[in-house]
Image (cartoon, rainbow, N blue to C red):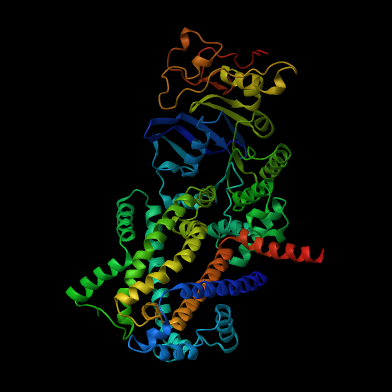
Amino acid sequence: MSEVILSVKNLSVEYRVEEGIVKAVNDVSFDVKSGETLGLVGETGAGKTTIALSIMGLLPVPPAVVTQGEILFEGENILAANEKYLRTLRGNKISMIFQDPMSALNPSTYVGDQISEVIMLHNKVSKDKAREMAEECLEMVGIPKNRYAEYPHKFSGGMKQRVIIAIALACNPNLLIADEPTTALDVTIQAQILELMEQLKEKKGTSNILITHDLGVIAKMCDRVAVIYAGEIVEMGTLRQVFKNTAHPYTKGLFDALPGNSLSGKRLKPIKGSMPDPTSLPENCKFANRCFNKSDKCDQRIKLVDIGDGHLVRCVSPLCSEGVKSH
Amino acid sequence: MKKYIIKRLLWMIVVLLGVLFIVFVLLEFTPGDPARQILGVYADEEEVAAKRLELRLDDPFLVRFGRYVYNLVFRFDLGISYRTKLPVMQEIATRFPITIAIGVLGLVVSVAIGLVAGIISAVKQYSWLDKICNVFAVIFHAMPNFWLALELSLIFALYLKWLPPTGYKGLKYLILPVAALGLNGSTAIFRQVRSSMLDVIREDYIRTARAKGQSEIKIILKHELRNALMPVVTMIGNSLGAIIAGSVVVESIFSIPGLGNYMLQAINRRDYPVIQGSVFVLAFMICIFNLLTDIVYSFLDPQLQSQYQSNVKSKKRGVKA
């Protein structure tokens, strides 16, 4: 449980586009230990997907540029590795599930062949053996194997996402990155897919990075959570630390904005304002102009500090410290 | 799928009858008397009248049309050329292979150039390669193919003397006509391949393929090309008409004794059976190629394939109910 399999250190990524330099990820560091699920939560445009694509080595270059940092996977720096080595990792040791299952499968290839493709890429097996293994993968995600030779348009969204999970897990990866795996699905299917992911994680012992903006999903699935705002980690800790001893005003804002947390009949409490323009991020606290707890101290560069037991917060006046309950 | 093809073949008969009818009507309204054309300006009225009777030109329009169709269907006979007095079917049979060769080779050349250049352009978008391909595409697209044919003949036959300028005595004589047709046709295919490849490259399933660890070249061949080809195939099907029309022009420039040239001469000489026969054969060819296009299309797009099947099935059910 303690072995670190992925270590992201001081990662910064920019997109250099005509409108200027978009600072998508700023000095992000985190570790993923073997067998755990780390949740990355944040609103749209916070830089979650960019982090995931950096780990896969799939950033669109250009316009993306990694300006600093390293990503260590099994001791190798992914950012400095050559394409050939990365190809042996992708789909094999690191897999990714994408947001929209509707468009993530090739429409002109049998779903089964799309699974055996990844098996044949990373294992020296015959076509027939690969087909057999792919059929097992289909059954593993709850699809009868006689649907191997069918095209994606005959599958529903939830079924497609199951196929994508089968593709991602076909080679028993050490790390699975799930980028909003349930966002495009309706609620009942969402629950099924999450259940399936949890089962498979327990069965295979895969470490997961789960990217979402849904705190409910985080609560159900994750061991640790990193809250991301404007390309920075603003709070990181165990599920209990972040959910029970919420220390950053932004995280608190997220919880307050949940419908379940305000009494019925009362208005929702959204976080006022919107994220700062990523082409001109302020040097001081990036959340300051939306923060209810703002003071003069906020007008400076703020570091991520440990408020006890590894609970990290990027705030000069955290709402609580570890061991002292604020609510 | 089999039922779909049979249905399409039945429709083809209707289309061909329609084409023949239109040609008949057009020729009916064309000024000039074929009998006079055959006998020359010095023949007297009685001779012309006798010729008209011999050719049965005085029968009512629909009777002549009916007779023509009857002969075509039951005797496989397209009539006799007014000028050479030989059966049109036989004359077409000797010329048809040359036109087919030029058309098919022209198509092959245009598809080959269009595909390769289109893929390179899309994969290396905005690179100098892409820019060069685009510039050439605009140049060749802007050139009418008769002018391109003349230029090619000027450069390679007259100045460089590498290739024969006119006539047909073997494959060497086909190089210039095929090049003229192919270069002209390739530009449209190039642009279609490039734009549909650019669409597909941005698709999510390409990212999925990358996330599997697939190599770039295989992503292009296995995932991108097949999906990008669908609109291209439709376009190739549509451009066949243009290629066949182009072959008429190109054949007459290079004096190649093909069907197009034959038809052009027949039009100038009011050789009605030859005009009707050639148009019929060309229309038949285009119909067949269109059908082939649709069949290829259904193999590329599985969604269509199941549509054909369900279409036939649902119609069947409808009949039973």
Q: Which residue: 65% across, 19% down?
A: A256
Foreground residue among A131 and B149: B149
Q: Which residue: 48% across, 64% down?
A: B238
Which x, y percent locates residue B232?
47, 60
Which x, y percent locates residue A277?
45, 24
Above or below residue B223? Residue A209 is above
Foreground residue among B276 and B127: B276
Left or right: where A279 falls relative to B321:
left
Number of labels in the image equals: 0
Farthest residue toward the top? A296
Above or below residue B248? Residue B141 is above
Above or below residue A193? Residue A106 is below
Which x, y percent locates residue A227?
56, 26
The quarter of the picture where residue B171 lies is bottom left
Farthest residue toward the front? B45
The quarter of the picture where residue B181 lies is bottom left
Is residue A77 visible from the viewing direction of this image?
A: no
Is residue A294 visible from the viewing direction of this image?
A: yes
Left or right: where B274 falls relative to A191:
left
Left or right: where B281 falls relative to A209:
left
Q: Which residue: 46% across, 33% down?
A: A9
Foreground residue among A122 and A276: A276
**Quadrant where the C terminus of chain B is found in the figure:** bottom right
**Quadrant where the N terminus of chain B is found in the figure:** bottom right
Farthest residue toward the left? B159
Foreground residue among A298 and B285: B285
Above or below residue A251? Residue B174 is below
